[in-house]
């Protein structure tokens, strides 16, 4: 009984990793389709006669970059051995907040709050960049696991 339970505990992370990877591949395919759809929306806005709605165009550009950043994050996940870099989440957050400022600018207090959120995200990015990427205790733990 104990061996079966140990086997299940050993195989469960592998199973869930496969489920996660397949799900992310489906998500990447859907986001790629939506990215191409946004390109067609750009051309539609540009070629419509008499339309000078730059706010809609800017909002579409930022949506395009959100799709692009999510796809890039999924690619990085697979390239960096199943790890999501934190900086991509910060990029996505900043882009999303800039989009909100452009699209939803009716209430000045909301715009101020969105700007403060962007400032906090940028400060977090700065702090992340000045701290060392590898921690000594993590390296010691990895070396100990390799020895065993």
Image: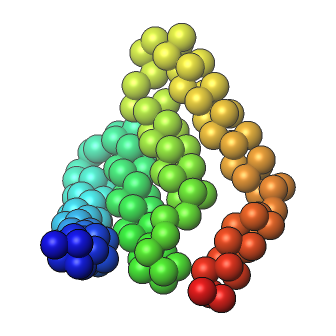
Q: Is residue 18 visible?
A: no
Q: Position of residue 50 (x, y in %)?
A: 27, 45
Residue lying at the far front of the rendered structure? 1
Tell me the residue at 39%/62% (across/down).
70
Quarter of the image with the C terminus in it: bottom right
Q: In this rendered view, identify the residue nearer to me: 144 or 22.
A: 144
Q: Quadrant of residue 96?
A: top left
Q: In this rendered view, identify the residue nearer to me: 137 or 119.
A: 137
Q: How many marks?
A: 0
Tell me the residue at 74%/73% (across/down).
140
Q: Is residue 23 above or below residue 38?
A: below
Q: In this rendered view, identify the residue nearer to me: 1 or 46.
A: 1
Q: Position of residue 42 (x, y in %)?
A: 30, 59
Q: Position of residue 85 (x, y in %)?
A: 55, 64
Left or right placement of residue 109 versus residue 120 in this view: left
Quarter of the image with the N terminus in it: bottom left
Q: Is residue 127 visible?
A: yes
Q: Is residue 19 above or below residue 81?
A: above
Left or right placement of residue 41 versus residue 91 in this view: left
Q: Position of residue 51 (x, y in %)?
A: 29, 44
The chosen color scheme is: rainbow
Q: Quadrant of residue 133?
A: bottom right
Tell me the residue at 42%/80% (across/down).
78
Q: Is residue 80 above or below residue 23?
A: below
Tell me the residue at 83%/55% (across/down).
130
Left or right placement of residue 8 versus residue 82 in this view: left
Residue lying at the far bottom of the rendered structure? 147
């Amino acid at each position: 009984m104990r061996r079966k339970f140990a086997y299940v505990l050993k195989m469960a992370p592998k199973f869930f990793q496969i489920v996660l990877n397949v799900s992310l591949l489906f998500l990447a395919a859907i986001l790629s389709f939506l990215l191409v759809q946004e390109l067609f929306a750009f051309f539609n806005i540009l070629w419509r006669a008499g339309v000078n709605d730059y706010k809609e165009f800017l909002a579409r550009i930022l949506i395009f970059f959100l799709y692009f950043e999510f796809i890039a994050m999924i690619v990085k996940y697979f390239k960096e051995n199943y790890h999501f870099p934190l900086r991509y989440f910060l990029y996505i957050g900043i882009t999303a907040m800039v989009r909100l400022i452009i699209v939803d600018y009716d209430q000045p207090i909301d715009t101020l709050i969105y700007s403060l959120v962007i400032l906090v995200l940028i400060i977090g990015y700065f702090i992340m960049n000045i701290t060392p990427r590898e921690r000594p205790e993590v390296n010691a733990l990895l070396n100990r696991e390799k020895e065993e």
